[in-house]
Image: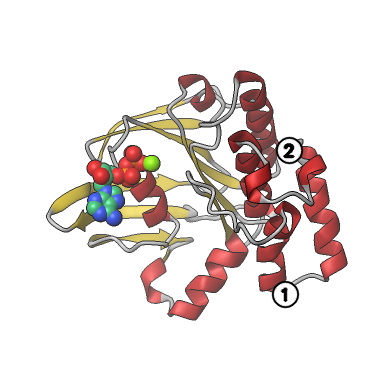
Amino acid sequence: MTTTLSTTGLDVPLLEARGVTRRLQRTTILHDIDLTVADGEFLAVMGPSGCGKSTLLYTLSGLEDPTDGSVLWAGEDHSTLDGKARSRRRLLEIGIVFQQFHLLRNLSLLDNVLLPGLLARTEQRTVLRTRAEQLMTQLGVDDLTERGVGEASGGQLQRVALARALINHPRLLVADEPTGALDSAATEEMMDALAEISAEGTTIVLVTHDAQVAQRAHRIIALADGRISGDRPAPGNG
Ligand SMILES: Nc1ncnc2c1ncn2[C@@H]1O[C@H](COP(=O)(O)OP(=O)(O)O)[C@@H](O)[C@H]1O
Ligand SMILES: [Mg+2]
């Protein structure tokens, strides 16, 4: 029998949403969502603007709690962890690329990528710096290390945000429209990078408007008005 925390695969899903409902004020944004994401799976989430995609990502990552229902991480409810353990999980195991990047303006782009690594304190600064530079090279933004947020394009910031999300080798990468600001060549490069990350075993949940981007995943779910309206396999990367 495999153990729950083996790195070679789980005998429970990495993520499981059970009856997840999310209400804000009087609006119900997510309705009774049941969804499992297997360890190592690459899932794309599609749906029109305002249907709840970002809210679903935040709820799955444990940034927000469901109003009803629960989200299990490797079989354990996110909400059973205290604040500190939850922050630690967020920092070490979950990489998030936000739709609006949320990069810090008072740091260089390299320092933005380094920051979660420094906060984690699991590796030496020189090791982290090498990794940060490698990630920025892999994503084609290595010439921007000393620049600030105001000195890069939206597409470049999107790639820097991805590098930051990967610095601590997360088990789960969550990306909210990471190709939204990219032209088709840069989109292709971003998807090649995500395919590589997926092939290394990282679980990915990706929100996208672009059907061609979604085709690079293993599975595509459609969201409409806060409900899952479709769930089908995708060709994936192989
Ligand atoms: N903090 C909030 N307060 C009130 N309504 C919100 C809040 N965040 C999101 N919403 C609403 O919830 C719905 C889903 O939002 P969101 O998850 O951002 O959708 P998507 O990412 O699919 O565009 C939208 O109608 C949005 O206006
Ligand atoms: Mg959104």
| Residue at mark 1 | 121
Quadrant field for ligand 2: top left
Q: Name the amino acid type tagged 1.
A: Arg
Residue 63's tag is none
Task: Decide which of 109, 134 is in the foreground and name it.
Answer: 109
Q: Position of residue 32 (x, y in %)?
A: 21, 49
Q: How many marks?
A: 2
Chosen colour scheme: secondary structure
Residue that protrudes farthest toward the left in the picture:
26
Image quadrant assignment for residue 139: top right
Q: Is disc 1 in contact with disc 2, using a CB cutoff of under 8 Å?
A: no
Residue at position x 34%, y 49% in the image: 55
9 with respect to 219 (left or right): right
Whole-percent x and y of residue 62? Answer: 42, 62
**Residue 31: x and y, percent?**
20, 47
**Quick one: 49 or 197, which is closer to the camera?**
49
Furthest residue toward front: 150
Give above or below for 209 relative to 198. Answer: above
SS of the residue under disc 1: loop
Mark 2 crowdedness (10 Å alpha carbons): few <14, some 14-19, many ≥20: many
The structure residue drawn at horizontal position 40% and vertical position 27%, both measured from the top left corner, is 232
> Residue 118 appears in which quarter of the rendering?
bottom right
Asked whether residue 57 is in view, the answer is: yes
Residue type, mark 2 in image = Leu
Asked where in the image residue 190 lies, by quadrant, the reply is top right
